[in-house]
Image (spheres, helix red, strand yellow):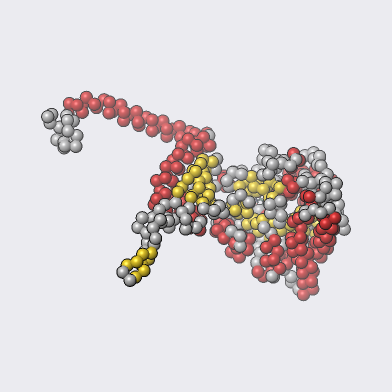
Amino acid sequence: MTPGIPGFAPSFPGVTLERLQSWLPTIITVVVAVCAVIVALAVVSRLLRRLAPRAHWYLFGFPLLRLRMGHSWRHLCLNAGLTGTDRPTTGQLGPLLVKGQPIMPVLPLLRRIRPRSFGATAVILLHPGQIPEPFVNAAEAMAHAWGVHAVRVDARLRGRVRLTILTADPLTSQPSEPTTKAAEPSEPPARQAAVTTYLPATTAPVVPAVAVPADLVAETGHREDGQQWVIDLVTFPHWLVTGATQSGKSTLINAAVAQWATRPVALVGIDCKGGMELAPHAPRLSALATDRAEAANILAALVTETQRRMRLCRQHGARNIWQLPPEVRPVPVIVIVDELAELYLVASRAEKDEALRATTHLLRLAQLGAALGIHVVVAGQRVGSDFGPGVTALRAQLAGRICLRVNDEETVKMTLGDLYPDAVEAAQQIDPAVKGIAVTTADDAGWIRARSVYLSPEQLAAVIAATAHLAPVLPDLTPPAA
Ligand SMILES: Nc1ncnc2c1ncn2[C@@H]1O[C@H](COP(=O)(O)OP(=O)(O)OP(=O)(O)O)[C@@H](O)[C@H]1O
Ligand SMILES: [Mg+2]
């Protein structure tokens, strides 16, 4: 037997110094080749990251994330309490019934990990007896374990939870500029007129006289998962928008109005801050209230209009205005209230009756309007119990919620807490330095972060000027003076 190199034997018997010397060139070549490949990959990765971030993500980022997810899944589940068990956790010990921790926990299955432009999506299959709540609570732990910006957990499916994995915050990195890209409505378009752009219409648009449901969908910006952010009055007929001063409420409303203005819908403004906020929209509005008394009158006229529409629907055996024949279908009305507090909060006894009248009519509109094509979008810097009991009743009708940066916890909880408790923390973490970021309801994702596009005053003025002639005249309401 050939003696081995001292120290190598007995692990590598037969490996002699001569043999090792004869392999040396091959070993060096292989090591150099491996190093060269690693360096080349690192250079390509760096270049791609700079020049083609999307290609970089699919070729390098996603495979690495997948490895990381697979590698950390067991530890993550054990540490974050996400495991199940297939054995009973109670047993009999002599005359005693004892309860214990399972020593062989079963991991939930992490499946369907798919790359997306914003990061990845995945599905976790729950074991019988598991509930989604610990997974919702572990979202932060997942983001840390996988080194990503955020993980959103959608717990609305039965027996599984869906993960949306975001590698970066697209809302702070993306410019908040209007785009020229045509925006597809989320539903199959009922008609091409509903497909619009963010950019102002410089010429008067040709709009069919009769509205269709797709006209109520306004594309207002980008969501953090890369999809368009829409305010969809078909899915959520009424909306509550809260945000501290300078957080982006008016910017968001401008983005939505710029879309609705080009369609056959009536816009009504209630701006009890003296009409300062909605003044730029005035030429396209069918009515504008600039104080509480005017607001009460306009809202009363709209309540009468709902009663007229009810009669019309009854006569035609329709359950909503969309079932009416096009020739009798009334125009949808979108009532925009900027600064809810101005309607609710009173300084003197004399104002009380007026406030009660205005807020009662607003509540009635929210209760009755959805099927009758009357929608409310209510914005305010804060919403609180000091507004009185009526505000909770109103909030219950406003299924669409948008919370921009706010200054107090109560407003966040009032806006999101009753529907999406896990969204409250996300809203509290909105960076004040980046304007226009919001946490919003989304029919397909529960809640999501989003950012509206910013239209300059000139761009908004151009849309309003080009569409002013489309403002429908509503019964008992006078359009604002030019
Ligand atoms: N989505 C956005 N993208 C870029 N900038 C934005 C965005 N939203 C708001 N801003 C910036 O913040 C400023 C204030 O926004 P905006 O007027 O919409 O706030 P607001 O919530 O209506 O404030 P207020 O309660 O005082 O009326 C805007 O003039 C704009 O410069
Ligand atoms: Mg404003």
Task: Provide residue 208's location: percent of width, then percent of height.
Answer: 81, 42
Residue shown at 51% from the left, 43% from the top = 120
- Residue 310 seen in render: yes
Residue shown at 42% from the left, 32% from the top = 41
Q: Hey, which quadrant is residue 392 in on the image? A: bottom right
Task: Provide residue 169's location: percent of width, then percent of height.
Answer: 54, 47
In the rendered view of the protein, which quadrant contains the N terminus? top left
**Which of 283/438 is in front?**
438
Up the image or down, 68 lies above or below 303; here it is above
Residue shown at 68% from the left, 46% from the top = 219
- Residue 408 seen in render: no
Query: Residue lying furthest bottom in this view?
Result: 349
Task: Provide residue 253's location: percent of width, then percent of height.
Answer: 71, 52
Q: Hey, which quadrant is residue 14 in on the image? A: top left
**Residue 97 appears left or right of 47:** left
Task: Provide residue 423's location: percent of width, then percent of height.
Answer: 57, 57
Residue shown at 65% from the left, 63% from the top = 382
Number of numbered tags placed on the structure image: 0
**Which of 104/288 is in front?**
104
**Which of 237/262 is in front?**
237
